[in-house]
Amino acid sequence: MRSLWSLGLAFLLALTSRAGGLEIPLEVEQLPTITVQTAGPVIALPFEGSFSMRCEAKGNPQPVYRWTKDGQAIDPLFDLGVKKERNNGSFVIHSGRLAQFQGMYQCYASNNLGTAVSEEIELIVPSTPKFPKEKIAPIVVKEGQPVILECNPPQGIPPRKIYWMTIGLQHIEQDERVSMGHDGNLYISNALEKDSRRDYCCFAAFSVIRTIVRKTAMSVVVKSCRFTYYTSSACPFLPMEAYAIPERRPSLLVPSGVQSEVRLLKGEELVLECIAEGFPTPVIEWTKRTEKLPKRANLKNYGKRLTINNIEEEDDGKYTCEARNSVGDTVHYFNVMVEEPPRWQPEPPKGQLAVVGSDVHIKCSASGKPRPVISWRKNGQPLDDGPSSNRQVLDDTIVLHRARPEDSAVYQCEASNRHGTILANANIMIINLPPRMLTKDYQRYSVVQGRDIIMDCKVFSSPPSTVSWNKDDTTESVEGERFSVFKNGSLQINQAGKEDSGEYVCFATNSEGKSAITALLDVKVSLYKCAFIIRYFLDDGMLQIINVNQSDKGTYTCTARTNLDQDTASALVTVLDVPDAPEDVELSEQKSWSVRLAWVPGDDHNSSTTEFIVEYEESQWDPGTWRELQRVPGNQVTALLTLHGHLNYQFRVYAVNGIGKGPPSNPTDRYKTLPAAPDKNPENIQIQGHLPHQMDISWEPLLPVEHNGPGLEYKLSYRKLGVEDIWKEHLVKRHAFVIKNTPTFIPYEIKIQSRNSHGWGPEPKVVTGYSGEDLPTASPQDVAVEVLNTTLLRVSWTRVSLHFLSLSQVHWLRKRSLLHSNRIPEERHFLTFPGNRSHAMVPGLRPFSEYRLTVNVFNKRGNGPNSDPVTFQTPEGVPILTVSNAQRDSITLVWAPPFEANGILTGYLLQYQLINETLAMGDMQEVNVSSADTTHWLLQGLGEMSKYMFYLSACTRVGCGPQRMEEGSTVTEASEISEAVNTSKNFHLIDGLEPGTVYTVCLLAKSRLDNASIFEDVIQTRVKGKREYLHLGVSTQGWFIGMMCAVALLTLTVLIACFVTRNKGGKYAVKEKEDLHPEVESQGMNDDTFGDYSEENPLKASQCSLDRGMGGDSDYGDEEECQFNEDGSFIGEYSDHKNRGSVRPSPVTA
């Protein structure tokens, strides 16, 4: 839009000199002449950035500028708040409060000699058009009576288009009986029962300001006697078959009366309209008195509207419209008069330069219809004809008798009639001036022998000067066939020769004096001749062709020559281009909803056509817009097109090759398809329950081209799912519907079928959705907790009986630390779990603390009540211990302090002893680590290839706490470190090992303290032809294997007995054993799930992500990234702490 308005503004700027015919150099004192002005009207659209009011003039002295608005003098800076441009009178209005700028502007450019005036510039600030808010009573008529639905559209910036549609944006069908008038009203010649509806809407679209407004919907009720079973004055008692719409002779709804007078400007469009009522529907016929209708006449709106574009004077006259039906007729006469706004005839008045004492005639001729009135001003002021004035005004001419210097001025001529006003400035200079040379003296000119040359001699004087040329100090003027002196004083020499070189003197003479200048001419002999073709360049043996086109194709030959030999080479140039437009595009096999399109391909320009693209345009819903319909392979020249019903199509084709897409073909003739039932149903059905007792259903409506006919609507059917119930149905025109008074959160089956006036669409698909849900009112009962270790808790409760989609939330609050007697700031946390479940796992607890826990359910409507609170305590924590960097006689132990020290740590007690496969233990060795900050220890002097058990306890001044145990082995040889492991793979290949040799393999992390191992195992490489694995000590003895089998059998028998006892209601002391051994590595966690984790006071220690989404349950044992230590705490709590040991993950099994 901006580009269009910028182009329009360019045309609005009138770059004109109203003092045409008077060319006075600026070096000479002269009257002001306006050179640039804005020609109105200027429309200030709110989305445009700024608006220029241009006013530029020339003159000597330099003109000064002033403005008027609505006839009152204004200062743009003080009155409008805008700043004028430097050196001219223009100013720019920026978008903002534009309403204050609306009005008629005029610019005045003045110097001490006179004043020039611009034409009036109208600045229009359009307001947003609106229909008035009103309540329109229904229109009730009997069948067969006429109906007029008044639109009365608001005024706005043209073009304005009027549409009649329903609230659902479906066009009101129009024909000979129902049509929209030129005034925007909807006229029904005789109402039928089908015209009854409550949503007749008039829409007004203003494309320039990008606005569409709608009038309040109007209701029409058409009463019919054919289906009335009672007697009234309107419907007397008659047999049913006797009721029929009474016939009625035509009468005109538009225009009123018998005769109308129409005035319009030459070049405009003549629009005459007659809309009649009556039954049967009248037919309109147009004639022109005494002659035939012009060939340019067009009939529109089903023959009710006569239009003639670009009307001329010969189109004047009387036009007649006659409305006729089988009952009678009526006539209306239009008296058309073509008029014109004022125009200069033949041109505006010119400026004049006259000598003192002469008579000056200023003629201002203008044509127009009605004849324009001529008025005069001098320097912007009305003429004052005093008794001593030498000025005489004769209608369109001013005569200055015996003109004097004080008569010099800018005379304004204004021609007006009822269609507009035009204004012109005429600069009249009364002056006597001797010749003044405007061309530089001793100007040098050069010319090649045999060519023509022009030497300038510009002069200004009053009266005009006589110009002559002399050569080389001669007193005689140059003359001959080769010499010409122009009116502007310039001398032209044709076919200059060497003898023409020399000095030339130009003399200018008038009654006031004489002036002269000298010009020097040098005629040279041509030494070179060059010829070239602009698009071809030769550079070092290479030919370059610029801007290649089809004419450049062909064979090019290059020849290289020396004094002894020559050689040639040829190249064939093939020019590739997009394909030409297909030709002879024709329709065949025309059926109701399909047609075959055929065409002849254009030239592919040496690049094979890959495909053809068929496009269509339809005139009902989106006229002028071309859309892709089908793609066809490049080796086919026909396409069978499947079409929608009730559309008026035209088609075009364009070809595509490897270079690009070619131009489209000429469009085909229009092809209108017959209306039909819809061939598809709405898609993307959305079912939501925003309120407890209703169900909101919405869907994507059919596109307008998919309607296939008038009267589109949708049948919405629904019933409860899983219940023997009938389908409930509603017919709707919009694409949304609300079902009220539904039970809370009940599944429904829904289907939507489209229908128009020609039938039903296909059988629709059934979708399922739920009605609205309500706020939960029940709370979970029988909440129980089971503390699995220091940081992990299992919660269970009785499910809530619900009739809505719900989620569960577990809230817990750390009330205090059992280590300190004083209370701590409350730390609130909660986890969310999908579905109506009965258990959950709660991680991230703090050891040796007291907690309070509640459970509730919630849904989109809000939270349900909390359960009764449950209070529990977590046990004390123990330090974390791992073995790393095993060598031949040493092992490094790495640990982290306990989460709760239960006092001030004073150090650690480290014990270890030698073990074997029978777990027989050797002597216990002790190491007292006296520093609480120590988190690793190197044990040396150990046996080669031996297995040890290590025990670590954290100590305070009161004593040492529970032990943490870890196994480790020394190796036979010093370790070797391989290259870095590729973290994107789940394996690593180690080569160069010896067959049948025992190795310890460790996976180390560089970022961990002392290269602590993440993974460690002992393996033995295979001997060729065998599969052997390392078994240390007695593990390879037969008696040991037999004993292990017996132990396994005994364990299985005990487990079966426990299972039977549990099923009978008995209990067994597993919980007590777990309390005695909180560091057990494997905890049973089947069917337990972590949900979405959130906390009101974040935990101080870092935690791994628990966000597993709401998509479904995730068993705790399946989480690979969220790993826990044996005491239940997160490994991540220690991984980033400075000076703490690395921790080997303890696998969590399920």
Image (cartoon, rainbow, N blue to C red):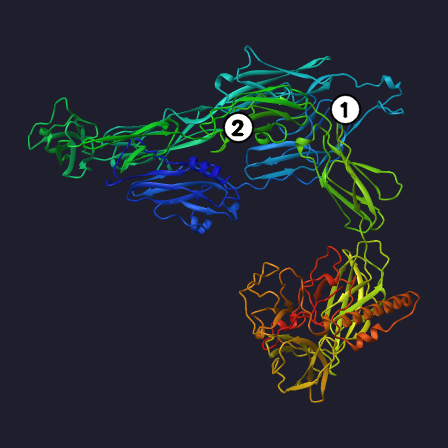
Q: Residue furthest bottom?
A: 957
Q: Position of residue 359 (x, y in %)?
A: 26, 28
Q: How many marks are shown on the rendered structure?
A: 2
User: Looking at the rendered structure, which numbered label has been put on residue 805?
Assistant: none
- Mark 2: few/some/many CA within 10 Å (<14, 14-19, 20+): many
- Residue at horizontal 58%, vertical 18%? 334
Q: Nearer the viewer, mark 1 or mark 2?
A: 2
Question: From what the image shows, is residue 350 above or below residue 748?
Answer: above
Q: Quadrant of residue 281?
A: top right
Give the Cα distance between marks 1 and 2: 47 Å
Question: From what the image shows, is residue 608 above or below residue 1072?
Answer: above
Q: Position of residue 342 (x, y in %)?
A: 44, 27
- Mark 1: few/some/many CA within 10 Å (<14, 14-19, 20+): many
Camera-nearest residue between 991 and 538 = 991
User: Looking at the rendered structure, which numbered label has been put on residue 192?
Assistant: 1
- Residue at horizontal 10%, vertical 32%? 501
Camera-nearest residue between 952 and 165 = 952
Question: From what the image shows, is residue 1137 above or below residue 129?
Answer: below
Q: Sequence order check: which comes first, mark 1 or mark 2?
A: 1
Camera-nearest residue between 1097 and 357 = 1097
Q: Position of residue 710 (x, y in %)?
A: 71, 28
* In the displayed structure image, the side of residue 387 where residue 923 appears, left or right: right
User: Looking at the rendered structure, which numbered label has been put on residue 654?
Assistant: 2
- In which quadrant is the C terminus drawn? bottom right
Camera-nearest residue between 349 and 476 = 476
Specify the amino acid type for callout 2. Answer: Tyr
Q: Residue furthest top?
A: 290
Specify the amino acid type for callout 1. Answer: Leu
Label 1: element kind? loop
Label 2: element kind? strand
Kindly tell me whether residue 379 is visible in this rendering.
no
